[in-house]
Amino acid sequence: MRFYELLNFQHTMAWLFPTLIFMVVFGVGLAFAHLHGKDSEARKKTITGRYVDGLEERDAPYPLIMMLIIAGTFIWGFLYIVMHGLLGVKI
């Protein structure tokens, strides 16, 4: 049991709000941001396959926010290994 009961609430809010903010930013990033190329508008509109129940497939550009999140994950993992292995620092 914690000495201060308010500390539990503060920790819960400190975990909850960054998660909610991340979900909103991630959703907006998936909806609007992608790398623009010469044919990106045409790729977003051209239907490459049709499936049952009216589902349509497009060869749309990959979202920029996903590339940044994947790159950040790999960079963090690499730096964690280096910091923890060489310096003995726990992040």
Image (tube, helix red, strand yellow):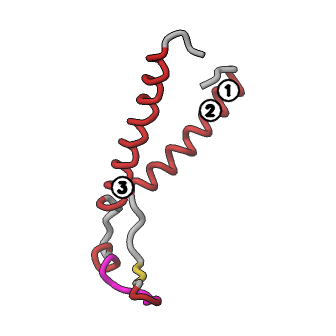
Task: Report the front residue among 46 and 1.
Answer: 1
Residue at 40% x, 80% y: name it.
58
The disc placed on residue 72 is none
Residue at (56% x, 38% y) in the render: 76
Residue type, label 1: His
Where residue 55 appears, as percent x and y from the top left, is 41, 84
Residue at numbered disc 2:
80
**Image-based side of 30 in relation to 91, left or right:** left
The tag earlier along the polypeptide, 3 or 2, is 3
Q: Please report the residue visible at 39 percent of the width from the left and 44 percent of the height from the top.
A: 22
For label 2, the SS is helix
Q: In this view, does 45 lie to the left or right of 75?
A: left
- The reply to whether callout 1 and callout 2 are in contact (CB within 8 Å) is yes
Label 3 crowding class (10 Å Cα cut-off): few <14, some 14-19, many 20+?
few
Disc 3 to disc 1, C-alpha distance: 33 Å
Amino acid carrying label 3: it is: Gly
Q: Disc 3 versus disc 2: distance between alpha carbons?
A: 27 Å
Front position among marks 3 and 2: 3
Q: Is residue 45 magenta?
A: yes
Label 1 Cα neighbours within 10 Å, binned few <14 / some 14-19 / many ≥20: few
Q: Which residues, given as a range, are shown in magenta?
A: 44-51
Residue 47: x, y in percent?
37, 86
Q: Which mark is residue 27?
A: 3
The answer to whether residue 76 is above or below residue 48 is above
Q: Are marks 3 and 2 in contact (CB under 8 Å)?
A: no
Find out whether residue 13 is within the magenta segment.
no
The residue that appears at 63% across and 26% down in the rendered structure is 83
Amino acid type for the residue under numbered disc 2: Tyr
Please name the residue that numbered disc 1 is placed on.
84
Quadrant where the image shows the C terminus: top right
